[in-house]
Image (tube, rainbow, N blue to C red):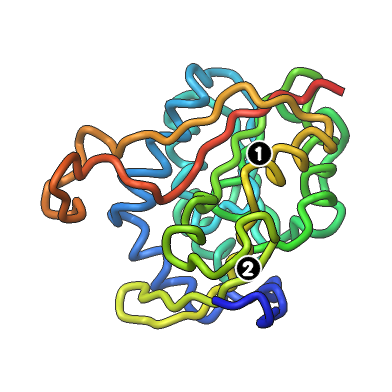
Amino acid sequence: MTSETRPVEQQSDHYDRFAEAYARENENGLFNRWYARPAVVDLLGEVTGRHILDAACGSGPLVAELQDLGASVAGFDASPAMIRLARERLGDGADLKVADLTRPLPYADVLFDDALAVLVLHYLEDWSGPLAELHRVLKPGGRLIVVVNHPVIPPVMYPEVDYFATVPNQEEYDFDGVSATLTIWYRSLSAMSESFTAAGFRISTISEPPVSADTPPELLPPSRTDPTRFLGFIFFALEAIS
């Protein structure tokens, strides 16, 4: 990771090539099934009767889980392949769209009680437009749950990088045997907070949760202390206030 390298952001259909492998990996993988999704559901609390938007919903696991909990859920993703997989999971009647978070969203103003942006904003250099659109479609007082890579990762793993700079890093991943290169844009905690405030949100909660208590022990990373807690993602609950 270097500050001189500035790769372009992912294209909207970047995930199409490995969508099926990504979906398989995340069905029971540590970081999504046992870490991100349980923490998001916990932050949302009671969702019965609430209208929720899942931005960058992927193959729809959170949509399905929240529907089972009594919510009415719409989802969109920039990857047509991901939406195809979500339809296979949720049925043709599901409220799913192909849409790009960096462009105007195909939803009316003040439509949703809650919105989710789980593991998507860190692919973007500029958060202003996406956050403005998510604020637009939320009702006053509506909640936005944001999950991104933890800002402490660059100082720990790449100490030569300026923590206070918004910088990209190309990272190699293996999704169920399929390799993929993703560009993650890291930024400081203060930069995140300033972006939320500028878009009309107030931070209600900042969370660094443990994994689910039901996590299979063989999936946990080796640790001399507590393997259920590690710095992977940071979780925000925001309130639309203006």
> What residue is shown with label 1?
53
| Circle number at residue 88 | none
* Residue shown at 52% from the left, 38% from the top: 235
Mark 2 residue type: Ser
Distance between mark 1 and mark 2 Cα atoms: 16 Å
Residue 79: which numbered mark, if any? 2
Please name the residue shown 70% across and 61% down the image: 166
Dot 2 lies on which element?
loop
Answer with left or right where residue 47 lies relative to residue 122. left
Amino acid type shown at disc 1: Leu
| Residue under the point 38% across and 47% down | 231
Residue 7: quadrant of the picture: bottom right
Whether 89 is drawn above or below 145: the answer is: below
In the foreground, 55 or 96: 55
The residue under the point 48% across, 68% down is 158
Secondary element type, mark 1: strand
Q: Nearer the viewer, residue 29 or 200?
A: 200
